[in-house]
Amino acid sequence: MELAQIHGPDGAGEALVVRLTKLAAHPGSAAESEPDSPSLDSPVGTGPSPDTVLKVLLVEDDPGDAMLLRMALRENGEERFQIATVTTLAAALAHMAREMADVVLLDLTLPDSAGMETVARLQAAVPDVPVVVMTGASDPRLAGQSLTLGAQDYLVKGDASGAMVVRAIRYAIGRMKTQIERQSLIVRLKQEQAAMRRELDAACRMQMDLLPGGRAIDDLLGALDLTVESYFQPSSAIGGDLWGCLEVPGKQVGFFSFDFSGHGVGAALNVFRLHALIREHGALSKDPAAMLASLNQLLTTLLSRGQFATMWLGIIDPGRDELVWSAAGHPPPVLIHPDHSFELLDTRGTPLGASREAKYHNRRVPFPRGSCLFTYSDGLTEAQDATGEMIDEAGLIALLAASRCAAGGVDLPGFLDRFFAAIQPPLMDDLTIVSIKRL
């Protein structure tokens, strides 16, 4: 049955309105109910079980329209509907407070509410109940706006058949179910993201705790007339870079820096692993090459295929004015001599964990007072400037030359200012910088 029967432009349509209105006014009919009290039809249609009955709340103040909608639902042979009818929004909200409906058929023009306010008020009261808006043929724009406010579907009076009403109800219920499931999934994802963020923050703090610090390190460096400045910034919450300091017997001190392949959690776990191994091999600290060889043998059995670490390990012996180092493919540190000249140290060598047959060698260079050693990870030299070109070693030397400290060595804050002014953010790799100066 077409709802257009009560809204046709010809006289027959108008006569039908009068006839249906009079029919609805007979004693005992739904139209005799108080305006704020719902009229409740018995379940209509066919179905295998009462469990399949859908509760429909019809909010419509026009008796003729309400009658035709109920008749349309009765003609449906696939669903069972229990229809409650009210004529005002206030009555609808009161009914929903007592008994929730599966779907609401909502007229946009009611005695106590009209237009978008009607949809907004209903959605605020029962946000999880699907709503099918019913609007006159003269205001389809309002129907579109109602979808924006949260309605699931709309029907234009005069254009909707009984089958269309049933389809709209099914669609509205299905869409609301999908919406609720999606919102529930979003909530769970946000909760999981928050939990992961808390775990990453804890892991970041643990990684920061691995960096040198404390009174013991300060006393050691002070006794050897050394000063150290550093900068550490992972590209994500946690990174695959680390540097550290080792106390070496005989009034010496060791410094190391390493960088694992990859980024994120996997690389960070390997950082904790290698840091623990370095501490366990402290007895080899006087011989950098022997320590790297031992670490390599262990990492080749511990790391997965494709995982490796570049590393640099140097021992400063103030008594001999000497620096001894060994390397495993790490970016070459820059030695700044007392005369302010620059020298890139040789760091050729097989990365740790890449080959059990790898060999490592010690190298030596004078390190008198006034010398400065600048070590870094490849996140510095592989950073790109505004033109897309990498900083590389030549750009690094230029930045160091522009960042000399008056007393010798490097003004690290000034260096960082120039570096970040030159590059194109964001950094795509972890960045570690350590500046070691002998006073």
Image (cartoon, helix red, strand yellow):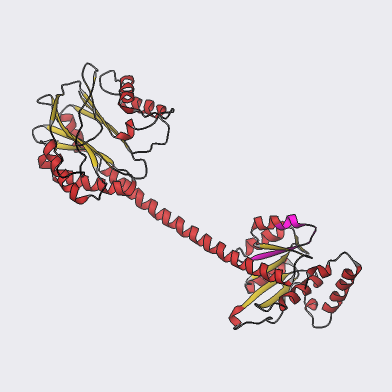
Please tell me in which quadrant of the rendered image residue 86 appears.
bottom right
User: Can you give x and y, in whole percent of width and height, for residue 409 in the image?
Assistant: 26, 22
Drawn side of residue 327 relative to residue 262, left or right:
left
Check the picture and name the quadrant holding the C terminus: top left
The answer to whether residue 213 shows anywhere in this view is no
Check the picture and name the quadrant holding the N terminus: bottom right
Q: Is residue 280 above or below residue 415?
A: below
Please tell me in which quadrant of the rendered image residue 289 appears.
top left
Looking at the rendered structure, the number of numbered marks drawn on it comes to 0
Asked if the magenta segment contains residue 137, the reply would be: yes
Q: Residue at x 30, y 26 (%)?
A: 393
Q: Is residue 134 above or below residue 413?
A: below
Q: Residue at x 69, y 60 (%)?
A: 119
User: Can you give x and y, in whole percent of width and height, for residue 245 in the image?
Assistant: 19, 37
User: Can you give x and y, in whole percent of width and height, for residue 337 in the image?
Assistant: 21, 20
The answer to whether residue 352 shows anywhere in this view is yes
Q: Nearer the viewer, residue 155 or 128?
A: 155
Q: Residue at x 13, y 40 (%)?
A: 291
Please tell me in which quadrant of the rendered image residue 77 appears.
bottom right
Q: Nearer the viewer, residue 110 or 19?
A: 19
Residue at the top extreme?
A: 339
Residue at the right extreme?
A: 11
Residue at the left extreme?
A: 250
Q: Which residues are magenta?
A: 128-143
Q: Residue at x 82, y 77 (%)?
A: 24
